[in-house]
Image (cartoon, grey):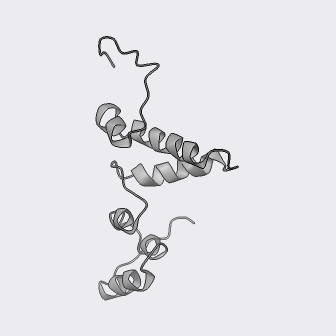
Amino acid sequence: MNTEGVDGTKTSTNNVMEARDILGIEAARSTIAHEIGEVMGDMDIDPRHMQLLADVMTYKGEVLGITRFGLSKMRDSVLQLASFEKTPDHLFDAAAGMKTDKIEGV
């Protein structure tokens, strides 16, 4: 960051999209994880879980929400879609479309 009058080592944002646009998807991922930690405050949550959630939200190279609309853009896994919301609809669509799901992990 070479903006005159701005010290990039002491500047931060909580705007995920701004971080993505200026610094890239990895900065957006880091911002998401940090903001989840801020929201959860003093709750005893393993930081790896927050990192995992941030990873899921950014692994496609764009910032996706953890909503039925964001997850529907992650169409790699029928079971992943069915595990969140509208399970019968996702399973019916997968069966009707003869989709398969490579189960590569838990």
- Kindly identify the residue that appears in the image at 32 percent across and 63 percent down: 73
- Kindly identify the residue that appears in the image at 55 percent across and 47 percent down: 39
Q: In which quarter of the image is the N terminus?
A: top left
Residue 88's place in the image compared with 69, above or below, is below
Horizontal placement of 104 versus 75: left or right?
Answer: right
Q: In which quarter of the image is the C terminus?
A: bottom right
Horizontal placement of 30 versus 73: left or right?
Answer: right
Residue 9's place in the image compared with 103, above or below, is above
- Kindly identify the residue that appears in the image at 50 percent across and 43 percent down: 35
Furthest residue in direction top, as rendered: 5
Residue 13: image location, x then y, percent:
41, 33
The residue lying toward the viewer, choosing from 8 and 24, is 8
Residue 54: image location, x then y, percent:
48, 49
Instruction: Say which quarter of the image contains residue 75.
Output: bottom left
- Kindly identify the residue that appears in the image at 40 percent across and 40 percent down: 28
> Total of numbered circles in the picture?
0
